[in-house]
Image (cartoon, helix red, strand yellow):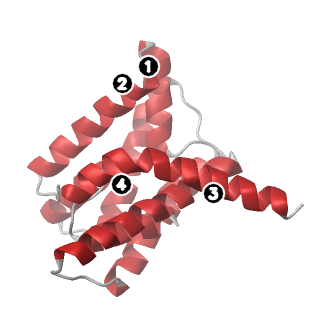
Amino acid sequence: MFGLGEAVLIASAAGNSPWTVLSQGISQISGWSIGVTTFLTSLAVLLLWIPLKQTPGIGTILNAVIIAIAIDLSLPYLPQTDVFLLRVTEAVFGILLVGFGSGLYLIANLGPGPRDGLMTGLQRVTNLPVARVRTAIEITVVFFGWLLGGTLGLGTLMFAFGIGPAVSMGLYLVNYFSTRSN
């Protein structure tokens, strides 16, 4: 779900999530697909875990692999349009999918994703508030992604302000439906 949501956001051409701006920029320079650069970025982030003494779980590895594969497998089949309203609608749908996918992934509790582990590790080491650490990380990656040619736009801003509520809704829905089935 998370990877499909990222792919929908990319296909909207309205602006990517910060980490996908970076992956797309690397993709444009390297010639590799966005899925491959997403995976390689995840591996690079995992290397940053070493000095932070973070421990990956099976979910950490699956996060890196599955999201990258989902992006590459779904992106060629997603609609692309020049109609602004449809692009924005597609971006909103992508953000909601990422939020729901986050709810599924977080409820599983199998280890943080590479980027979440970087955030929690840096927060622990610096003792700064999580919001400040995450914001600094996101601004840094979007800046370098933009310098490399990644797509920055309205969708990026929508993601920045909408992902929190989308994840909250995803967590609520996953929790609601998982407790209803018992």
- Decide if residue 15 is on the left or right side of residue 129: left
Which amino acid, mark 3?
Answer: Leu
Mark 2: amino acid: Arg
Residue at the disc numbered 3: 104
- Residue located beneath label 1 in the image: 129
The amino acid pointed to by label 1 is: Pro
* Alpha carbons under labels 2 and 4: distance apart: 25 Å
Q: In the image, what residue type sits under mark 4? A: Leu
* Residue at (48% x, 39% y) in the render: 116
In front of the other: label 3 or label 4? 3
What residue occupies the far top of the structure in this picture?
127
Residue at 15% over, 64% down = 28
Q: Are marks 1 and 2 in contact (CB under 8 Å)?
A: yes
Q: Which of the 4 image quadrants contains residue 78?
A: bottom left
Residue 76 vertical placement versus 90 (above, below): below
Place of residue 117 in the rendered image (x, y in percent of width and height, measured from the top left): 50, 36
